[in-house]
């Protein structure tokens, strides 16, 4: 059934729809179990400064190793978690775990965490963030919360006050997947973002001749600079893409060209190697 359909509405299901709903219900149950039985873990992908080629932070990315089906992508199970209310406790686990891991890194290395619009709409989010910071001892300025444009689709007042409550804690805010949603410049005026993450769809293939992507990236960078925000180009895979992105002035780069997401232990190794410098 389509996302957002009202519950309790009578519908006629075909056998295929029934099987799909059953599959989803089963996954939901498995996910619930994974949360309490250690089936979820985080991997961390380096975010690199264009200027210095030092790792300035890592993005925490959630992984689920299903006992039977193997690895399931967050693009598949996060929506299930959102629909079932599981995103609350899962998101809290992500925050606590990532803050605890990051507290072991160098003092100037940040951790970025993806926050679902459902979490963002919950007035309890700031206290969850505060507890994760207090429990780990991580300085608030080392935590960056990534939010997508979809948070703006819900009521305006709640959104505004959530932004100021989170900023009040001293954490950083990033606008994720910029350019894919209902990109409105009005959001940038209202919301106190520290960083814009330029979506992979603009970055990938930008180096191909005749691509319009580089003009778009350039415009986003100058907009961000005028507003005092950093920019991360997401999903750079090739040397050509990297060279172009640096030329276009993005302040940060995240992509396979520097490194895929790695487990927490591997982050410690990367940190010790070359004082946090990384080669493409
Ligand atoms: P995102 O926040 O935009 O994360 C970036 C995604 O791009 C990650 O996919 C990352 O592995 C992938 N990526 C990075 N560089 C490259 C590259 O050079 N090439 C390619 N092909 N891919 C690259 P991943 O880990 O599968 O996560 C997908 C999405 O799932 C994330 O997109 C985010 O929206 C969501 N997600 C992941 N972890 C969490 C979480 O803890 N909480 C919530 N609410 N959502 C999460
Ligand atoms: Mg993200
Ligand atoms: Mg993204
Ligand atoms: Mg995304």
Image: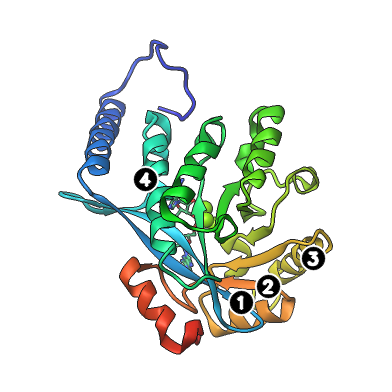
Residue drawn at the location 50% of the way across and 50% of the way down: 114
Q: How far apart are labels 1 and 2 at the CA level?
A: 6 Å
Callout 3 crowding tier (Cα within 10 Å): few <14, some 14–19, many ≥20 = some
For the residue with label 4, is its CB less than 8 Å from the closest atom of ligand 1? no
Mark 3, secondary structure of its residue: helix
Which label sits on residue 251?
Answer: 2
| Outermost residue, right side | 226
Q: Quadrant of residue 48?
A: bottom right
Check disc 4 and report the residue beneath it.
93
Check disc 1 and report the residue beneath it.
49
Upstream in the sequence, badge 1 or badge 2? Answer: 1
Q: Is residue 50 visible?
A: yes
Upstream in the sequence, badge 2 or badge 3? Answer: 3
Q: Are marks 4 and 2 in contact (CB under 8 Å)?
A: no
Upstream in the sequence, badge 1 or badge 3? Answer: 1
Q: How far apart are labels 2 and 3 at the CA level?
A: 10 Å
Q: Quadrant of residue 60?
A: bottom left
Q: How far apart are labels 4 and 3 at the CA level?
A: 34 Å
Mark 4, secondary structure of its residue: helix
Residue nearest the viewer, comparing 130 with 224? 130
Residue drawn at the location 23% of the way across and 49% of the way down: 39
Residue 237 percent location from the top left of the image: 51, 76
Mark 2, secondary structure of its residue: loop
Q: How far apart are labels 1 and 3 at the CA level?
A: 15 Å
Q: Are marks 2 and 3 in contact (CB under 8 Å)?
A: no
Q: Is label 4 or label 1 in front?
A: 4
Check disc 3 and report the residue beneath it.
225
């Amino acid at each position: 059934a389509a996302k957002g359909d009202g519950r309790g509405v009578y519908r006629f299901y075909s056998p295929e729809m029934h099987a799909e709903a059953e599959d989803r219900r089963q996954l939901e149950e498995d996910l619930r179990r994974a949360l309490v039985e250690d089936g979820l873990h985080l991997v961390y992908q380096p975010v690199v400064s264009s200027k210095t080629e030092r790792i300035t932070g890592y993005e925490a990315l959630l992984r689920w190793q299903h006992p039977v089906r193997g690895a399931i992508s967050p693009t598949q199970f996060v929506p299930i978690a959102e629909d079932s209310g599981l995103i609350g406790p899962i998101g809290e686990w992500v925050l606590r775990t990532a803050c605890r891991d990051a507290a072991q890194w160098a003092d100037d290395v940040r951790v970025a965490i993806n926050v679902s619009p459902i979490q963002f709409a919950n007035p309890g989010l700031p206290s969850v963030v505060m507890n994760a910071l207090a429990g780990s001892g991580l300085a608030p300025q080392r935590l960056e919360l990534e939010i997508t444009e979809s948070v703006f689709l819900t009521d305006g007042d709640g959104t505004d006050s959530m932004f100021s409550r989170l900023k009040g804690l001293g954490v950083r805010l990033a606008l994720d997947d910029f350019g894919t949603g209902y990109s409105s410049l009005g959001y940038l005026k209202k919301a106190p973002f520290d960083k814009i993450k330029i979506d992979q769809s603009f970055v990938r293939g930008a180096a191909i001749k005749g691509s319009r992507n580089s003009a778009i990236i350039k415009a986003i960078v100058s907009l961000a600079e005028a507003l005092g925000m950093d920019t991360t180009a997401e999903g750079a895979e090739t040397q050509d893409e990297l060279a172009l992105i640096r030329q276009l002035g993005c302040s940060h780069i995240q992509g396979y060209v520097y490194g895929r997401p790695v487990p927490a232990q591997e982050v410690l190794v990367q940190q010790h190697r070359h004082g946090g410098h990384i080669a493409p």
